[in-house]
Image (tube, rainbow, N blue to C red):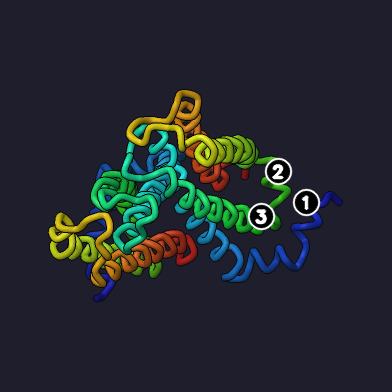
Amino acid sequence: MSTLAWLEQTEFSDWVLTAFSGFPLMLTLHALGLAVSMGLILVMDLRLLGFFNFVSYKFLQRALLLAWTGLGINFLSGTVLFVPRGVEYAGDPAFLTKMVLIVLGLGNTGWLHGQIVSESGTWSSEVAAPVPVRYWAAVSMLLWFGVITSGRLIAYVGR
Amino acid sequence: MDYRSIVPVLDWMRSTAISQWVTGGPWIWPILETLHFTGLGVLIGGLIVMDLRLIGYKHGLSLRTVHEIMPLVFIGFGINACTGFLFVMGDPHRYAVNYAFQVKVVLLLLAGLNALWFRLKVSPQMKDWTEITESPVLAKLMGTASLLLWLGVGIHGRLITFFG
């Protein structure tokens, strides 16, 4: 029996599927983590693209800590949601697409965060960030929108 | 209120062309849901930044933040008001008796009243504030109430699935 199939038969999976603190609570946390992380990453992206110059890069660095916290909440709640349905999800194109986009999104956001920490002191506070950074900020919006879309479609594709 | 008294209204809503469109194809509902989650992120992202400054968080946030990030909040709200309206039109009988939805609507109204009160009472005074002005207690309460009310809206929106 595969590990994923074994996980589905554990008491933990039973609890996720039946308790209110299972699926309902975890999905709610997943939505709240989405709101906080996607919302603040969007503010970062727009700031790098030249909007909202009243938001300083100093503030963005703090906001990004909150965004990473939201992503952490979603990693944990997402893992709990995965365990009882691992076999199904492992073959679901929407889920697999989401995982790929998350890896790309995390890499991109991590890089942008690093750029803000190390380089933003030399950027003008009035206009968009320099060229490679501003392009990756636009890519960030596409990647995370793709994560939200493929995540929502897990409920509809592959079952 | 007796549920049966509004059934004719619900029946009428379900008979409209909008309602038929929403449920007319297998991908319309999922696409609207995707937009609704995206709008949630847009709204909450702007709201956190706005309310933090209103509450008095000044580290790297200009006072202009409160008013000038509002368009982002309104775009998110607009997306969700439109998609939310379409959900209700598409399945009115289910939403009418859904406990989580009813709580969500009440919280939305309270959030709206809070925003209106801010607009009338605090917003006009803000032109006299400077970057170092301490936020009045009322402004802090409104910012906190806004974050908590929208948190409640998000929670109850997600729980609609689990109440029938």
Q: Which mark is residue A79?
A: 3
Other-residue count near label 2 (Cα within 10 Å), few / some / many at <14 / 14–19 / ≥20: few
Say whether mark 2 and mark 1 are on the same chain: yes
Residue positioned most to the top: A131
The residue wearing badge 2 is A90
Q: Say what amino acid the circle numbered 2 marks.
A: Ala
Query: Which chain is mark 2 on?
Result: A
The residue wearing badge 1 is A4
Secondary structure beneath label 1: helix
Front-most of residues B104 and B146 = B146
Front-most of residues A62 and B48 = A62
Pointer 3 or 1: first along the chain = 1
Pointer 2 or 3: first along the chain = 3
Front-most of residues B27 and B71 = B71
- On the image, the x and y values in percent for residue B23 come to 38, 44
Rounded to the nearest angstrom, the CA distance separating label 1 from label 2 is 9 Å
Other-residue count near label 3 (Cα within 10 Å), few / some / many at <14 / 14–19 / ≥20: few
Residue at 25%, 46% in the rendered image: B68
Q: Say what amino acid the circle numbered 1 marks.
A: Leu
Query: Which chain is mark 3 on?
Result: A
